[in-house]
Each structure stands twice: as C-alpha cells, then as structure tokens.
Image (tube, rainbow, N blue to C red):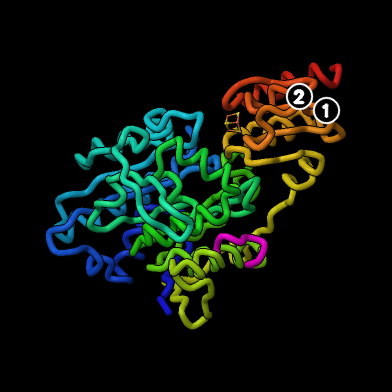
Amino acid sequence: MADIYQIFGQDAHEMTVRLLEASDAIRLVPSGGSVALKPNLVIAGTPESGSTTHPGVLSGCIAYFRDHGVQDISVIEGSWVGDETMRAMRTAGYDKICAEYGVPFFDLKKDKTRPVQTAIGKIDICCRALDAGLLVDLPVLKGHGQTLMTCALKNLKGCLPDREKRRFHAMGLQKPIAALGAALRPKLIVVDSICGDLDFEEGGTPVQTNRMYLGTDAVQLDAYGCSLMGLDLDEVPYIGLAEQYGGGKASWREKEIHSLNEPGEAAAYPKRTGIVAQLTRRVHENQACSACFASLVRAMYNTRLGQNEEIYIGQGWRGQTLPGFGVGNCCRGAEHCVLGCPPTAGEVAQALTDLCGR
Ligand code: SF4
C-alpha cells in the first residue's frame, strides 16, 4: 500500500513544497524527463470560491521541481464544456504564476489526441497528458452534483477533448472516469483541500478545511477523500470500479497516513449539506453534461424555484417529447425549455422565474 502525506494550514505554496519534500517526489521523475502539472480549472472561478486549485499549489510544485533540476515543466488543463480554459486560468491567477516562473500553460482543448485502449474500449486522450514524463494530478477535493465527490480520478477528465467529455456523460460517467484513471494512472497526486466546495463542483459555497495531502495512487487518495467527506465508498462507484480496472487500491489504513503537522481549528472535516439532492429530487437527469447540470442546480439554489416542477436534462432525452421543463438543447422537445449548450445559470434562473410566474 502507498503512503499518504498530509499537512494542515492555509499557505498552499509552503504546504505543497513540504509535502513534495517529505515524499521525496523527485524520485518519480524519469531521468531528463518532463513534468506536466494538471490542476483543476473546471470553470473560471477563484480558489477562494472552492472550485479551482490554488495557484500556490502550482508555484510550490514548480519551485520544488526546479530546485531539483527539472527544466521541462508545464501546466496543462482543459476546462469543462461551456467555459474557456484561458479565461479560467487568468481568473485563478495562473497567468501570473506562469509568467513569474517562465512556465508554459497549454490549453488541452486545443491539444492533439490519441486513442488509448481502456477497460471500456478506446478513449481519446490529450497527447500532452499521455506524453508527460511525470503527470502530476492536482485536484481539489469537493462535492459534485452528479457523482457526489470529485477529486483525483475525476480531475483527469480535463485531459480529454470536449467531444470525449460529452461522450463520458452519455456513458454514465462512472465507468469512463474509472477507466480513464486506470489508463492514465498518474504517479503523483497533490490534493488541495484547503477550501473546496463540498456541494457544488463549480464553487460558490466554499468550506474552509485547511488541509492538503499527497500520494502516488489516485484510487487510494479518492477513497481517503471519500471518507473525509463522510461518504461511503459505494456512494461513489467510480472509485471501486477504478480498482477493478487496475487503477490502484480503493482503501487506506491509518498507519499509511503521515501527518507533517498538527491540525488546527479545522481538525474535524465539515459535512456536506446534501442540498443538491434536496433541490433535484424531481429532476429527470439522463446523461447530462456537468456544466449543464451545474447551471440548473445553481439556478434552483439561487432562486429556490423549480422544486415542484418535472425538469428534464441530459443527452439521453434528445428527440423526445417531454411533459415538463427542459434544460439545454438536448431537451428542446419539452413543453417549456431553456435552450443553450449549456445554458448559463442566469438563463435557467430567468426561465424558471418565467415558468413559475414571478
Ligand atoms: S444541452 Fe446540456 S446535456 Fe445536452 S450536450 Fe449541451 S451541455 Fe450537454
């Protein structure tokens, strides 16, 4: 079983360097090889909103690997369907970090791809992720409207072109996420759990948890993250599936956790509110893309409207006549519909307001 190094605090740069030093991470870089840093820039949001990896995690990684003689370091990422990666990187402050350290940033939405054989068939994966000497996975531990939790395994979805991200949703997310994790199998993962949003992937209601942890097995780290968030492993099926597909071990033991300091005020991990499940109990979700689903949930959360409506969302409803409110172009066959691919949260909120007569 692999070791997990854990540290408490709020200084992302310093915490990252300490984790990398404690684990002797440089041993994982092949001689003369490159390092590709893969953060979570799912959306144009600040780290303080609970959605994106703190830029201090990037600067900490760059400083550490530079100090150990690695010359070829890059940052790679592709935001979710519906947002622009370069806008997201500026919003999170990565432009300043990349300029300060002279490190290139590559938008994976524009990268070449190669088909890779996985447990569920071929997946097109971006070449910069496949060809990195060491792929460093830098996720945020946070909640997710459809999979309940997102961390190391799901963060790898940013290594796909948009067409493949959509296909993942059409395949039901769980198996493809697991298969991608087993295929890419990053050898180093540094989790930013300083202030993730425990309910919304796109942030907005962050919870200060003041923790980071590092490991070499994405499946094990997700199993650990699951327990921190108070979830049972079977509530997040892609973790167990990733183990079945050969991606790592879906378990951890106390003796594998090495804490580099003592926890402060945030010793106990706060619990998720479960608000997304409450809001969406009458939503008929069928292969919805993350951005589309997030727009709907955010609109319902902000307006507190729609909870008594039959709402349809997802690629699985394409071409069907639907007796209720449809979200996105896929549900244009609904009685009432807000178009867009995806529609914004503001557009969905307006449509719900019109529908509910306010
Ligand atoms: S309308 Fe929504 S669910 Fe359909 S393809 Fe576009 S983003 Fe995905």
* 176 w.r.t. 112: above or below: below
Secondary structure of the residue carrying tag 2 is strand
| Image quadrant where one finds the C terminus | top right
Mark closest to the chain's N terminus, 1 or 2: 1
Q: Which mark is residue 323?
A: 1
Mark 1 and ligand 1: say if the CB distance to the nearest ligand atom is below 8 Å: no
Secondary structure of the residue carrying tag 1 is strand
| Residue 350 location (% of width, % of height) | 72, 19
- Give, as a single range, the part of the protein colored magenta: 233-239
The amino acid sitting under disc 1 is Pro
| Image quadrant where one finds the N terminus | bottom left
Residue indicated by mark 2: 334
| Residue 92 location (% of width, % of height) | 42, 36
Mark 1 crowdedness (10 Å alpha carbons): few <14, some 14-19, many ≥20: few
Q: What residue lies at 28% left-to-right and 66% top-to-bottom? A: 25
For the question of whether residue 15 can be seen, the reply is: no
**Magenta stretch: residue 37 in it?**
no
Between 353 and 264, the one nearer to me in the picture: 353
| Residue 323 location (% of width, % of height) | 83, 28
Residue 206 is left or right of residue 5, and the answer is right
Q: Quadrant of residue 302?
A: top right
